[in-house]
Image (spheres, helix red, strand yellow):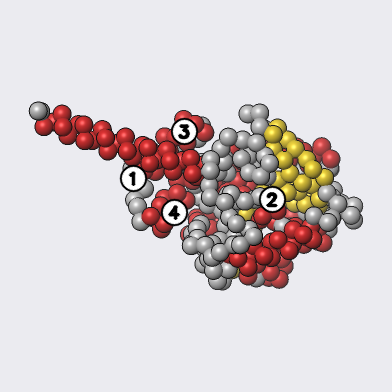
Amino acid sequence: MNPFFIVGIIFSVIVLILFIIAFAVFKIVFYNPPKTDHNNPKPDPFLGEDFPQVIKMVKEGKERLIKRPHEAVSVTTDDGFRLYGDFYINPTPTKNTVLCVHGYNSSGYGDFGLIANSILDNGYNCFLLNHRHHEQSEGEFIGFGVLDSKDLIKWIEKINERYPDGKIILYGISMGAATVMQASNKNLTENVVGIVEDCGFTTCWDEFKFVLKKAAHLPSFPLLNMLNVFTKHILGFDCRESDSRKCIAETKLPVLFIHGDADVFVPPFMLDECFNACNSRKEKYTYSGAGHAQSYYKHKEEYEENLFRFIDSCI
């Protein structure tokens, strides 16, 4: 038998196996990520030893939050999916709203269940959305900040239906932070006056590359290239091209950048790259010993002081 034919068969089998693996990874990442047991949380290799305590604090905050008056709201995306959220109207009348944008495999309450109370206590309305394919929101796949940044326009429109003269702060955590950065150069209404990004990533590609290396000790090629084939053909975007740095470089809005220096999920160098790319008014705070999306829980008083000073300056 021709040796070149045998080599060709072997190569084809290897490529097929890699594509099958890549598709399996795609389904896990974008369709069916593992769920956290919030009733019995355990330390997480990416979220650290403090993760169970963070979950406890969030649950306690949510229990207080849901007792406050709020309204169920929904929007329809450009591609026809119904998304749901909760609008907390401050009992002290105000037209100004903090739009809270949660992270990957989480929810509005999951990331903002505690700090939403402080947002209300500081005199603002608080809007908690749920991304596509999260909680009760529809959607076939997770948007990973790329699709969500487009959906964010709908949420802004929803707030403006009620408060057309009010001002809006976009506040994102993790994937939500990438979402608000990637929305920052879009055609936002003039009443969006500031952005807060807490531990956002640069691109999907960079994030997947980092996690592959850390979790599986694997190089990005060829698995990530094959994964990107699926995102382009199924989701309609290239993981390399949806870049938070490029978007934030074009915004004129003031931006507050936040990151924990012990983050091993979205590495702190991504904070520096996004911060350095930004050409508008900007502030940066790094919190010592804080893991991914945990700066607030490790340094609550300092975090709130910096956060609300920034928000007040934008309003």
Label 3's element?
Answer: helix
Nearer the N terminus, badge 3 or badge 1? 1
Residue 28 visible here: yes
Crowd class of label 1 (few under 14; some 14 to 19; many from 20; radius 10 Å): few
The residue that appears at 30% across and 36% down in the rendered structure is 15
Q: CA distance from mark 2 to mark 3?
A: 28 Å
Q: CA distance from mark 4 to mark 1?
A: 13 Å
> Do the numbered discs 2 and 1 sit on residues whose CB atoms are within 8 Å?
no
74 relative position to 47: left or right: right
Which is more toward the observer, 120 or 50?
50
Residue type at mark 1 is: Phe
Q: CA distance from mark 2 to mark 1?
A: 34 Å
Residue type at mark 4 is: Val
Q: Is residue 187 above or below residue 174?
A: above
Which part of the image, by quadrant, shows the C terminus?
A: bottom right
Crowd class of label 4 (few under 14; some 14 to 19; many from 20; radius 10 Å): some
Crowd class of label 3 (few under 14; some 14 to 19; many from 20; radius 10 Å): few
Q: Which residue is mark 1?
A: 221
Q: Nearer the viewer, mark 2 or mark 3?
A: 2
Label 2's element?
Answer: helix
Nearer the N terminus, badge 2 or badge 3? 2
Q: Which residue is mark 3?
A: 232
Q: Is residue 180 above or below residue 55?
A: above
- Please provide percent x and percent y for residue 164: 83, 40
Which part of the image, by quadrant, shows the N terminus?
A: top left
Q: Is residue 285 above or below residue 205?
A: below
Q: CA distance from mark 3 to mark 4?
A: 20 Å
Label 4's element?
Answer: helix
- Count up the numbered dots: 4
